[in-house]
Image (tube, rainbow, N blue to C red):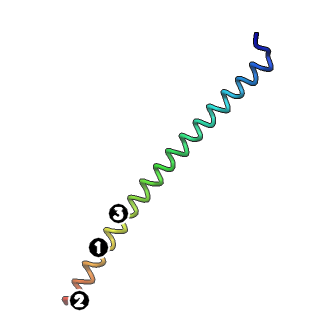
Amino acid sequence: MILPDQEQQRRWRALRDETKRKQAESRRQRAEQIRAEIESLEALKAEHAAAVEALMKKEARA
C-alpha cells in the first residue's frame, strides 16, 4: 500500500523529471537554432568577403 506522502513524493518526482526533460529538449532546440544562425551568418560573411574582393580587383584594373 502506498501512503499519501509517498504518492505525493512520486508525483512530484515525476513532475520534476518531466520538467527537466522538457527544459533539456528546449535547450537542445535553442542550441540547434543558434548553430543554424551562426552557419547562416558565416555564409553571409563569406559572400560579403567575396564581393569585396571582386570590387577590389575591379578597382585595381581600372
Q: Which residue is mark 3?
A: 43
Crowd class of label 1 (few under 14; some 14 to 19; many from 20; radius 10 Å):
few
21 lies left or right of 6: left
Three-letter code for the amino acid on which mark 3 is drawn:
Ala
Residue 31 versus residue 23 in the image, above or below: below
Q: Position of residue 34 (x, y in %)?
A: 48, 54
Spatial CA distance of label 1 from label 3 is 11 Å
Three-letter code for the amino acid on which mark 1 is drawn:
Ala
Residue 5 versus residue 22 in the image, above or below: above
In front: 29, or 59?
Answer: 29
In primary-sequence order, the first of circles 1 and 3 is: 3
Q: Which residue is mark 1?
A: 50
Spatial CA distance of label 1 from label 2 is 15 Å
Q: Are marks 1 and 3 in contact (CB under 8 Å)?
A: no
Residue 54 versus residue 61 in the image, above or below: above
Three-letter code for the amino acid on which mark 2 is drawn:
Ala
47 lies left or right of 27: left
In primary-sequence order, the first of circles 1 and 2 is: 1
Residue 53 versus residue 3 in the image, above or below: below
In primary-sequence order, the first of circles 3 and 2 is: 3
8 lies left or right of 23: right
- Helix, strand or loop at label 3? It is helix
Q: Position of residue 24 (x, y in %)?
A: 57, 41
Q: Which residue is mark 2?
A: 60
In front: 25, or 54?
Answer: 25
- Helix, strand or loop at label 1? It is helix
Spatial CA distance of label 3 from label 2 is 26 Å
